[in-house]
Amino acid sequence: MKKDFYEILGISKGASAEEIKKAYRKKAIQYHPDKNPGDKTAEENFKLAAEAYEVLSDPDKKARYDQYGHAAFDGAGGFGGGHMNMDDIFSQFGDIFGSAFGGGFGSGFGGGGQRRVKGSNLRIKVKLTLEDIVNGVEKKVKVKRKVQAKGVTYKTCSTCNGSGQIMRVTNTILGRMQTASTCTTCGGSGQILDSKPSGADAHGMIMEDDTVSIKIPAGVVDGMQLKVSNKGNEAPGNNSLPGDLIVAIEEIEHEFLKREGENLHYDLYISFPEAALGISKEIEAVGGKVRIKLEDGIQSGKILRLKGKGIPSLNGYGNGDLLVHVNVWTPKSLNKEQKAFFENMLHDENFKPSPQKTDKSFFEKVKDMFS
Ligand SMILES: [Zn+2]
């Protein structure tokens, strides 16, 4: 029969989160392996307290435990009893102990907690045209990466015996405590250079030119960062992991099209006669020209919406639109004949503005666009 979690921590069922935390801290200090070297019962109690705290400190798990007891965590995905090892406990509850226990311990018991050293990340910028962004693109980029030289070998660091950490014993209010610091000989990797190929640096590393292919999905935005895993700098040592390549997206401004989220805007200029007579016009869109028809009598400021001719959404929910803003161009100078023509029209009824309810003002159109 498993012991009740509340009983383990010595608290009542109605205990507050703060009381639970306090009770766990007390038990953890009481049964801490550093204070009870070689004491299996203390270690067992220490683990039980950690297990109880893991459940009771999580509102969701606590609710399930309060309702179903230990049965809540039986079976797949459950939190089985005694499965927690010391490394889990220290990594999960480090905050509970505060500074009294210093950084990490762990290598004193259980073992196997050595961290894998990771190489540093590389950063590059990729410039994309609107076409690239609309269609998605695969870019090949050249990067200079730090990699392990060919033929390099590493051996266990004798300073830290491969743990990557140096243990120190210090006296604290809780008694003698072990604290760990990163081994300076191996930099925490637990390994040092064994044989160094010519040309390699003190860690057995060389710089290498590499070409990395990056798949960029359609719909990316200027300033967005993509991560290509494991394509950063490598780290020394047999067990190390390469860093990542961080790709920052930079959008090259299009000559005619302005981007606004997933929509594109295009300013179309037409002449007086074109506006009066109506006309079919070719306009610039992404991936080629599009022909649009303007009815006769079209007003300056009209916005035509070409559905789906914008930018695809990153999450795959369709495309934005291309909004064509119609501007009627007024000639800046007129010759004699033209002047005479317009002077004749000055008092013509047909040239008098008479906006209808349907001829919305600029502000109403903008309002419509965003609603
Ligand atoms: Zn070392």
Image (tube, rainbow, N blue to C red):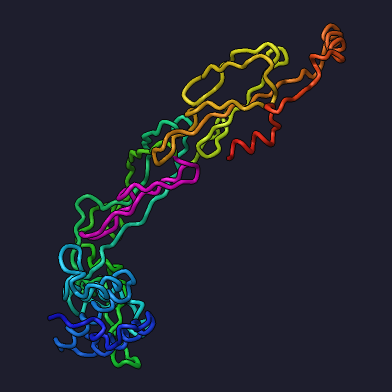
User: Depth check: 299 or 223 in front?
Assistant: 299
User: Depth check: 213 or 101 in front?
Assistant: 101
How many marks are shown on the rendered structure?
Answer: 0
- Is 238 colored magenta in this rendering? yes
Residue 19 position in % (x across, y down): 36, 85
Residue 21 position in % (x across, y down): 35, 82
- Quarter of the image for residue 142 reads top left
Residue 104 position in % (x across, y down): 30, 76
Quadrant in the picture for the N terminus = bottom left
Residue visible at 15% across and 88% down in the picture:
41
- Quarter of the image for residue 219 reads top left
In the rendered structure, which segment of residues is drawn in magenta? 220-249
Compared to residue 93, the image places residue 144 above or below, namely above
- Is 115 colored magenta in this rendering? no
Quadrant in the picture for the C terminus = top right
Residue, far left: 1
Our reading of the magenta stretch's main secondary structure is loop
- Quarter of the image for residue 156 reads bottom left
Residue, far top: 337
Residue visible at 68% across and 11% down in the picture:
277
Residue 295 shows up from this direction: yes
Residue 183 shows up from this direction: no
Residue visible at 49% across and 27% down in the picture:
309
Compared to residue 16, the image places residue 125 above or below, namely above
